[in-house]
């Protein structure tokens, strides 16, 4: 089953979005990777990497993020992954809350990484795929 990582500058937001998504799909493996090591607002490559590794499966991982620098740190975290893992971890630019809930539901239906990405990309465009 595909895993999901929620990245937010706020640890509380990441955890809250994770909690909402798990209400819809409690069997999905979702990591909340928010804030910095000292509890400040921001994102941290190590926390993101830990989140990826926590939910990683051969089926893949989708990463959702809140703001631009979270994207940058997610991309940097991917650089530290092995090549075989890198190919199975995808960063998706979509609405964080809606994307997490929709993504969790799609994952719970045991859809492939490619199918999940298509649906989440459809959210970004304002239409369901």
Image (tube, rainbow, N blue to C red):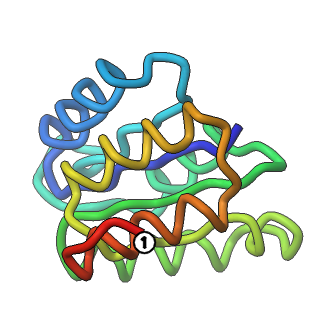
Please state which of residues 115 and 73 is positioned toward the viewer in this rendering: 115
Picture quarter with the N terminus: top right
User: What x and y, as percent, mark residue 74?
Assistant: 45, 71
Q: How many numbered circles are shown?
A: 1
- Classed neighbour count for the residue bearing mark 1: other residues with Cα under 10 Å, few (<14), some (14–19), many (≥20): some
User: What x and y, as percent, mark residue 75?
Assistant: 50, 79
Please state which of residues 44 and 106 is positioned toward the viewer in this rendering: 106
User: What x and y, as percent, mark residue 105?
Assistant: 43, 36
Residue beneath the point at 27% across and 47% down: 34
User: What x and y, as percent, mark residue 14?
Assistant: 24, 42
Q: Quadrant of residue 119?
A: bottom left
Using residue 2 as the reference point, say whether residue 104 is left or right of it: left
Q: Quadrant of residue 27?
A: top right
Pointer 1 residue? 92
Residue beneath the point at 24% across and 32% down: 15
Measured along the vertical axis of the image, is residue 42 above or below residue 87?
Answer: above
Please state which of residues 71 and 60 is positioned toward the viewer in this rendering: 60
Using residue 20 as the reference point, say whether residue 10 is left or right of it: left
Residue beneath the point at 17% across and 57% down: 9
Q: Quadrant of residue 69?
A: bottom left
Residue beneath the point at 48% across and 72% down: 91
Under circle 1, the secondary element is strand
Picture quarter with the C terminus: bottom left
């Amino acid at each position: 089953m595909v895993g999901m990582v929620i990245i937010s500058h706020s640890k509380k937001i990441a955890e809250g979005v994770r909690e909402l998504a798990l209400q819809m799909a409690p069997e999905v493996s979702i990591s909340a990777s928010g804030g910095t090591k000292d509890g400040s607002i921001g994102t941290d490559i190590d926390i993101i990497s830990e989140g990826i590794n926590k939910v990683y499966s051969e089926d893949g991982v989708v990463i959702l993020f809140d703001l631009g620098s979270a994207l940058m740190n997610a991309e940097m975290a991917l650089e530290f992954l092995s090549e075989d893992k890198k190919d199975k971890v995808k960063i998706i630019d979509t609405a964080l809350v809606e994307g997490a809930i929709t993504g969790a539901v799609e994952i719970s239906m045991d859809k492939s990484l490619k199918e999940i990405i298509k649906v989440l990309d459809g959210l970004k465009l304002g239409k369901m795929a």
